[in-house]
Amino acid sequence: MDSGDQRMSPPPRPPAQLPEDLVCGSILPRLPVRSLARFATVSKAWRDLIPGNAAFAALQAQSPSVASAALARFHNGRFEVLAAGGSAASVAPPDPSLSFAGGAYQQLELCACTGGLLCLTAVHSESHRLVFFVCNPATRSFHLIKYGCPLGVAGLAYDPAAAERGYDMILSATQGLQTCRFFWFSSRAAGSGWRARRGTVRLALFEALQPKPAYAGGLLHWLTNRGNIVWHDVARELCGTLPPPPCASGGGNMDLGA
């Protein structure tokens, strides 16, 4: 073949690059924790972004998925982030020390958790007043809520995938010996404080609600010391009870989860 008839193939195209805002704002926040641990070593910019950028942590919190979740526990008064296998997580958008809240509150005790939010009770170190402390360890944001209702068992209702942002707290309080009433606080109703809700639940004599209720399907569920389940529909302001689940002979302790 004559050399003049030979045609040179075009040079290979450089690999396409995705826009940085797409990568950092839409792709990275949805990745698993283990992948983010590796990607944090790619460059100094990503190392600054992934472990310590509050805006990036907020995007993670708004992109809930099983892949981007991490296991956590509240142990000996401290919030601890765990990865699979029970080891400390190598990526920590969540702040395990809750240092963003400052040192004005002590005696933290976990009441409920759902959708990445924690609800705790705390005591002000100077006034010694009891308050509710709702925080997101990923976004480093928190709200302090005055305890403006009867003592009871608090539950937290929050869906990070809902179009309307905000959370609700429902506190169940026993009045008399057998009547359970509910009190509501919403972060979306600024300045409204606590409000009593319609409806009550009749309990058996000496029946009591257990702490750390579970939130699922728009309902908060409390387990009682008799194995019954008390539920409250946050949106429709309804409440009721469920019979105890069938248990194996011999009894034993029961826990409620969702």
Image (cartoon, grey):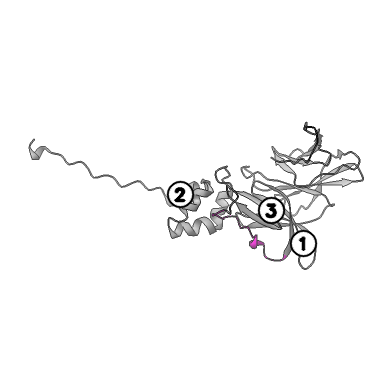
**Which class describes the residues within 10 Å of circle 1: few (<14), some (14-19), or many (20+)?**
some
Task: Name the spot of residue 183 as percent of width and height, x first.
Answer: 81, 47
Mark closest to the chain's N terminus, 1 or 2:
2
User: Against 10, is 151 above or below?
Assistant: below
Crowdedness near tag 3: few (<14), some (14–19) or many (≥20) residues, C-alpha within 10 Å? some
Q: Which residue is mark 2?
A: 23
Asked which quadrant contains residue 133, the reply is: bottom right
Please report contact status of discs 3 and 2: CB closer than 8 Å, yes or no.
no
Residue shown at 90% from the left, 41% from the top: 178
x and y, in percent, of residue 238 in the image? 79, 37
Mark 2, Cα crowd under 10 Å, few <14 / some 14-19 / many 20+, is: few
Q: Nearer the viewer, mark 1 or mark 2?
A: 1
From what the image shows, is residue 100 above or below residue 5?
Answer: below
Q: How many marks?
A: 3
Dominant secondary-structure state across the stretch colored magenta: loop
Quadrant for the C terminus, please.
top right
Mark 3: secondary structure: strand
Q: Amino acid at mark 2?
A: Val
Q: Which residues are magenta?
A: 89-104
Residue 231 shown left or right of residue 217 in the figure: right
Q: Position of residue 160 (x, y in %)?
A: 62, 45
- Badge 1 is on which residue? 123
Outermost residue to the front: 250
Q: Label 1 to label 2, Cα distance in Å?
A: 42 Å
Residue behind mark 3: 74
- Tell me what residue is drawn at x 7 percent, y 37 percent: 2
Q: Please state which amino acid type lies under the numbered disc 1.
A: Val
CA gap, disc 1 and disc 3: 17 Å
Residue 223, percent across and down? 79, 41
